Amino acid sequence: MSHVLIIIAFASLRMLPPPGERPWRSFDLDPLVSLLVAVVPMLALVSAASLVTSASMKRLDRTGRTNLIDAAESLAALGGTAATLWFVGAVGFFGWLDTVRLVTGDVIVLDEVIALVPLLLAYFGLAVARHPIDKRRGDAVLVRALDRGEPIYPVPPAMAAAWRTLRHGALTVAIPLAMIFAIGEGIDRGATHLYKTSKPGDWIARPGVLETVVPLAQLLGAVSILAIAPVALRIIWDTVRVPPGDLRDRLEALCERHNVRVAEHLIWRTGGTMLNAAVAGLLAPLRFIVISDALLERLGEREVEAVAAHEVAHVRLGHMAWLAAAVLGSITLAGGVVGLALRFTVPGFVETDVGQGVIVAAVIAAAIFGLGHASRRFERQADAFAVKHLSGAVRGGASVPVTAAAIGAMCGALRTVGRHNGVRLRKFTWRHGSLAGRIEALQALEGLPSDRLPIDAAARWVKGLALTALVVGVGLTVLDEFLRISAQTAQLAG
């Protein structure tokens, strides 16, 4: 969720119109007051989260009710959402970014990064506030590891743990976004300067050139940053290469078997605090499969292979591209439908600030829905891919029945990940669903032919719906724009 929140915060900074061009009423505050408005509520949220956590831990000691921990965790998550929403309000209505620019000037991306500092500090403070919960769970895991003779790691201090949470969460998105915004702003200013200093007949002074070239250049810049972002991720996440040996050989054989090219296999050094794996990178020369240290130490060989196959599936099945299509399709379809509905039912309303607000709200809701709906099904398809791999299925080869042993390895990995990370099996997350639901879905696959699994058909439906929504949404958007221009032309003619 922190990734989505930081995207919202950056969007509020990037899309803020100049003070004289804002279609809403904002408060003209003294710079010191604007600073207090931006910072004090963040401090209050962190303090409230700390008090709630402390009270929950005391009640847990008295009553032994573990549901209090879940309640405190939920409040901590709400604290991050509340901090982000307040930040957006401080930027849009209380002039926080304008205050920063009074000191720094409108320097490319520097002013936005400085303005973001209170929110990042709030995320850090909220992580510190919830540290007693993480420590209690970490102590329980440590005791269990001692009983089982497993490797143990001490629970890191609050500050170190909070810094790690910030690195693995907000900064993972914030740093690439800052680079994208820097390139976009630089291109915009450079093109504007060229236009202002151009002479009649220069290519940039021709009608429509500036409006076409700048967006295309900014898009290419953003794609370039996304392409090289995995290189930065290697540093942000503290990774090292998987050394030569049996593990590296098995990972390379896995990728070769399914025709997935990666630049490197990496170990993610988390100090034993996180069982996780990920695939990063759109392009093969800059694509990495990352597996955490704790995952390698807690899982058996077959379970590690199952998790790695799950990550390979995201590449082999094109999940990242289709996830983007699902979100874009949801956005364009919702925007087109709501825009046209407003245009025909309440003439003139769609051009008002309130009408635009309704469309924006519908688009955001649709994007969240599309992301969750597609992501959960892609996760289950990647799980199924892993058990097909362990059952002996080969791309382009004969169908094989899904075996109980393969299902057991993947389910065992999911249970271990949940237990070590302190995640209840029934806890639902928007992008991944619940671990229990994924386990039950896998268990239902036993004996089925690998080339006719229900989840593969469901994923194809999701991809088809995403593509249909995107095409229809673009068509509706074009139609809405045509109607808008026609209405303006008729008004001028009248």
Image (cartoon, grey):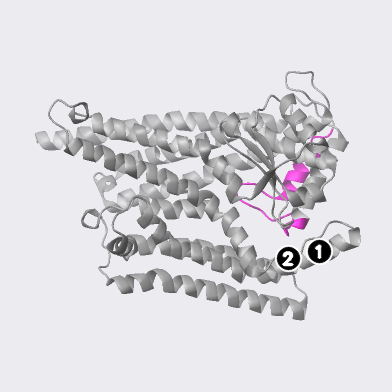
Instruction: Tell me: 301 left or right of 372.
Output: right
Q: Quadrant of the N terminus?
A: bottom right
Q: Is residue 429 magenta?
A: yes
Q: Position of residue 189 (x, y in %)?
A: 28, 43
Residue displayed at 73% across by 22% down = 395
| Bounds of the magenta segment | 420-446
As measured in the structure, the alpha-carbon distance from the residue carrying label 2 to the one carrying label 1 is 8 Å
Q: Position of residue 279 (x, y in %)?
A: 64, 39
Q: Nearer the viewer, residue 222 or 415?
A: 222
Three-letter amino acid code at the position of disc 1? Leu
Q: Nearer the viewer, residue 433 or 43?
A: 43
Q: Position of residue 170 (x, y in %)?
A: 53, 55
Rendered image: mark on residue 155? 2
Instruction: Tell me: 383 left or right of 488.
Output: right
Residue displayed at 21% across by 26% down = 203
Q: Is residue 392 above or below residue 181?
A: above
Q: Is residue 492 above or below residue 16?
A: above
